[in-house]
Image (cartoon, rainbow, N blue to C red):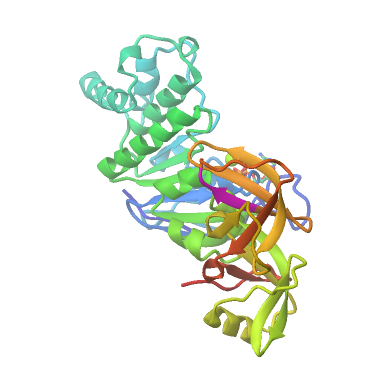
Amino acid sequence: MARIQLENVTKRYKGMKEGRAAVDHLSLDIQDNEFFVLFGPAGAGKTTVLKTIAGIEFPNEGLVKIGGEIVNLIEPMYRNVSMVFENYALYPHFSVYDNIAFPMRSPLHKKDEAYIQKAVERVVKMMKIDGLYDRKPSQLSNGQRQRVAIGRCLVREPKVFLMDEPLAHLDAKLRHFMRGELKEMQSAFNTTTIYVTHDFMEAMSLADRIAVMNNGKIEQLGSSLQMYYTPVNEFVARLFGEPEITIFPAELSSKNGRLGLKALGQEQPLFPEKDAGHALQEAGAASVDVGIRGIDIQFSLAPQDASWIKGAIYAFEPIGNKVIMTADVKGEKIRIAAPNSTSADLDEAVYLKFNMKNALFFDGVSKTIITHKK
Ligand code: ADP
Ligand code: MG
């Protein structure tokens, strides 16, 4: 149980280009017992953050604190953190049981065998691998191996769990199941957890709070709903939601004294809500990008009047619980969430209407948010 703080941490690996850093003046304050998710694309610096907390990498600048104590100079084994890596390494010549028991047999955290047996039994039950005690890693499926690795991470009662994409190699169904299990486990364990993923569904379903990382920095910190409804910029908006939000450029125009947005080559401007219109005028941005999510687009395959935007079906992808339909409007690809019952042919005409109440507006140059529904 511990609060984790990073204060202005910078990590540059040897050979990195001038001015580049894997982690760049990053500060974080993670509460005791929080389930904290680091989310972002490959290369963002997520693994490096975990490694500086674990003590496997040392920051060039800044402080790392665990439970209020500065640990910059403390060796990994004395930090009492438990980490599971994406490329989990099990000991090939050890059985499942011995692999999981291993951390409790290390000199520093040594426990007696009766204690170990209880602890191993507890985690194997949770991980649903209790029938596999005597198997060697080579006799396990990838998913089972990954669960053994997670089990080994969970078997101790460290101050912090650090999990680096622990479910990345599982198939979709097992991943979904394990997500639920991990969440439950974490609340049972009362241990601070920092969890790395590049899967937004995983991030949203697990996290108390999420930090979106990009280029060694935090783009936004908040709850999953904040990321979805109030992203600070286009980068964050694009990461959350399926289908990906559509963002297209627009020009401010005025029609009968009302602010409109000329976009997508349409005669008819799009009209933002009154409050959003005021905010856009106040911001005085030279250009505006409009973001609209797939569920905020109404569509019709039958012809509609000029207030609808005409496009052509560009792609049609059933994904199980819905269909992601992409329309081409003057070269702009608009992604729509359509019900499963939808059927449409490629190149078929489609008419769209945007629910502008839920639109997001970004500065066309800085790509940061101007206004959105609160
Ligand atoms: P993520 O986990 O978000 O994918 P990483 O923390 O692994 O990102 O990497 C961040 C950046 O640091 C990347 O540009 C990566 O190439 C670089 N990097 C990571 N590890 C090393 C290393 N050992 N030596 C040099 N560069 C590294
Ligand atoms: Mg990584």
Residue projecting furthest to the bottom: 257
Instruction: Answer yes or no: is residue 8 visible.
Output: no
Q: Is residue 86 left or right of residue 34?
A: right
- Give the prevailing secondary structure in the magenta stretch: strand
Residue 309 placement: quadrant:
bottom right
Q: How many marks?
A: 0
- The residue at the point 28 percent across, 44 percent down is 187
In percent of width and height, residue 49 lies at 54, 48
Judge whether 237 appears above or below 370 on screen. above
- The residue at the point 65 percent across, 83 percent down is 259
Instruction: Answer yes or no: is residue 311 visible.
Output: yes
Judge whether 59 appears above or below 264 on screen. above
In percent of width and height, residue 212 lies at 55, 55
Residue in the foreground of this view, choosing between 17 and 236: 236
- The residue at the point 46 percent across, 62 percent down is 226
Q: Is residue 327 magenta?
A: no
Residue in the foreground of this view, choosing between 120 and 185: 185
| Part of the protein shown in magenta | 335-339
Judge whether 56 appears above or below 353 on screen. above
- Quadrant field for ligand 1: top right
- The residue at the point 66 percent across, 48 percent down is 326
Judge whether 357 appears above or below 84 on screen. below
